[in-house]
Amino acid sequence: MELRINRRALVGLGLAVAVAASSMAVLRTDSGTASSHREAPAISNDPQHDNTDVYAFVSPDKPDSVTLISNWIPFEEPNGGPNFYPFATRSRHNIKIDNDGDGKSDIVYEWTFRNEDKRGNTTFLYNNGPVTSLNDENLLFRQRYTLKRITPGGSKTLVSDGIVAPSNVGAASMPNYATLRNQAIRNLPGGGKTYSGQADEAFFLDLRVFDLLYGGDLSLVGQDTLKGYNVNTVAIQVPQADLALKGDPKRNPVIGVCSTTDKFNGNSFVQVSRLCNPLVNELVAASGMKDAYNALDPSKDADVKALVDRVTNPEVARLLESIYGIKAPATPRNDLVQIFLSGIAKNNGPIKADLNAQSLNKDAGKQRGSEQLRLNMSIPVTKDPNRLGVLGGDLQGFPNGRRLADDVVDIELQAVAGAAQSGKLIPGLTDKVDANDKPFDKTFPYIPLPSNVAVNQR
């Protein structure tokens, strides 16, 4: 796959529009904005609104549909009572779809949550007996949600009284959480289904990358930092035609996906969290950019030269060279522009695979550079998935969408070090965490059930 494009292509994409002064003006914002696994200063103090991961993939057991998953609240220790982990209220939890390549949202799936709390001044317990159904009277705290599908033409309510699967308090309180999960799955009008509730933290990685890139000698690897933690999940599975431009996935099968959280600040809703591609804000944006980046709409990304420069001249590549002697590829890194900002144009370079198309996941529409998770819905479901996705010759994997089992840390480390240019993986460049500690389900919502065992007991 050839990932190189020239400087003229960068200009054509609108990625070198703004000068540095105006770029930093765009990035200036209030301190209430941030996102994803505590990587931005402000959101680390507001975990309830922290959007941690986004997944988008063709449903393996229903390939005419796409599954979208977004998670919130990092590092949920299973025994975190008495309040456990409700979704934020007075907020909007969004999964946004761009189906014409201009970086703007054409479809928004919006979840809003409300509480039903029967505890009052009578008890501190989340439940006062075993909970065997979502409507069980023993469940004293319950959340309900409304799900809307919003387009420029208007808004349609898909679910008005959905019940959230509760936090997994423990085996005595919830003897069969799988039953609660199944009851929380709702069918949608016109086809599809949705789920809201707690789930296993499915992102697997060693976060000691922040300790001088795994200790400065790759000694700090092999520990799944997120093992045993839970998250709050919203998931939706819809027909491909519901997402495609003009309802025709054959005409333009590529979609861009992002998830955001809008928080009500007393006067209006303000975007406080944004997540599209994994690890971008954690490992690309510099510290002073992180809060503002998460308030930015993808359609504005091309105007922020300071951020674009962090893609075309990535800090991680320079660190790999200075710490490990892995020579950084020449800049500008147009291969990374295609992975993160424009979509991958062709598949005729060093990585060989059978693709009867002009591009992997570059949108054929208006095309404006924007950081989004891009998915080509026409790529068939892989019979034997490769955890390294496209770098492993599996075109259905990241960075063509993101499946739960895609090893995005190893993929991005290898890509930043130049593997997408050369077609050759760099030996030893891995965090040695290759899979989740729990197997993924074979049916919707695919993400494993939440744990009820303390992290330090696993």
Image (cartoon, helix red, strand yellow):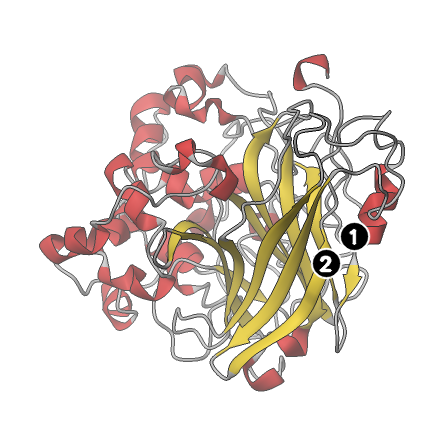
> Residue tagged by mark 2?
162
Tell me: 311 left or right of 147. left
Tell me: 221 left or right of 315. right
| Label 2 crowd bin: few (<14), some (14–19), many (20+), radius 10 Å | some
Residue 184 image point, x, y percent: 79, 52
Query: Looking at the image, do the residues carrying marks 2 and 1 touch, with CB atoms under 8 Å apart?
Result: yes
Q: Quadrant of the C terminus?
A: top right
Residue 118 image point, x, y percent: 71, 39
In the image, what residue occupies the spot 35% across and 42% down?
Answer: 284
Q: Is residue 78 above or below residue 255?
A: above
Toward which corner of the image does residue 180 lie, by quadrant? top right
Q: Nearer the viewer, residue 168 or 64?
A: 168
Q: Nearer the viewer, residue 198 or 386?
A: 198
In the image, what residue occupies the spot 64% across and 54% down?
Answer: 394
**Sooner in the amino-acid sequence: mark 2 or mark 1:** 2
- The residue at the far front in this view is 121
Residue 313 image point, x, y percent: 26, 45
Label 1 residue SS:
helix
Toward which corner of the image does residue 205 lie, by quadrant? top right
Amino acid type of the residue tagged 2 in the rendering: Gly
Label 2 residue SS:
strand
As measured in the structure, the alpha-carbon distance from the residue carrying label 2 to the one carrying label 1 is 8 Å
Tell me: 324 left or right of 152. left
In the image, what residue occupies the spot 20% across and 56% down?
Answer: 26
Tell me: 191 left or right of 105. right
Residue 13 image point, x, y percent: 30, 69
- The residue at the far left in this view is 21
Residue 392 seen in this snapshot: no
Q: Is residue 422 above or below residue 455?
A: below
Q: Disc 2 or disc 1, which is closer to the eye?
A: 2
In the image, what residue occupies the spot 57% across and 53% down?
Answer: 390
> Residue tagged by mark 1?
184
